[in-house]
Amino acid sequence: MVLLLLILDCETWTVQDDYGGFDDRSSTATTVEDCRTECSNNVECTAIDWVAGLSTGSQCWLVGPWTTSSVARTGIQRHSITRTCNASGCTFAVIEYSVISPNIVVGVER
């Protein structure tokens, strides 16, 4: 028997229209989802600024300690990330499973 811990929900996003930063780091992500994923994978990233009016591949900007200031800015959509993966705030599931044969796995969520 093997126990597997799956983290199900550790971050939430808040969206604010017409708000953005200066000196954000550029990204070549072409969708909001890819931009968010890039931010999620960078522990220093606190938000993304998405500028829909720019050309594809230059719409995503990562916000973090390198960002000098953030103010009301028309045409920019701020997506702020809240990470809750800690001892008191992370949602998770423990799955107990057994391998019966190489092709059969039986599991039960606990």
Image (cartoon, rainbow, N blue to C red):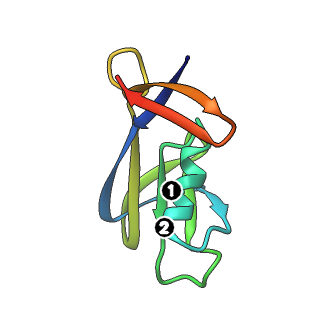
Q: State yes or no: discs 1 and 2 in contact (Cβ < 8 Å).
A: yes
Q: Position of residue 22 (x, y in %)?
A: 53, 57
Is 17 located above or below residue 84 in the figure?
Answer: below
Mark 2 neighbour class, 10 Å CA radius: few under 14, some 14 to 19, many 20 or more: some
Q: Is residue 45 left or right of residue 70?
A: right
Q: Residue at x 43, y 60 (%)?
A: 20
**Mark 1 and mark 2: Cα distance apart in space:** 6 Å
Q: Residue at x 60, y 53 (%)?
A: 38
Q: Quadrant of the C terminus?
A: top left
| Depth check, front residue: 77 or 12 | 12
Q: Quadrant of residue 109?
A: top left
Is 86 located above or below residue 104 in the figure?
Answer: above
The residue wearing badge 1 is 36
Query: Residue 82's mark?
Result: none
Identify which amino acid the numbered label 1 is placed on.
Answer: Arg
Q: Quadrant of the N terminus?
A: top right
> What kind of element bears circle 2?
helix
Q: Is residue 49 left or right of residue 23?
A: left
Q: Is residue 12 left or right of residue 97?
A: left
Identify which amino acid the numbered label 2 is placed on.
Answer: Val
Query: Residue 32's mark?
Result: 2
| Depth check, front residue: 15 or 8 | 8
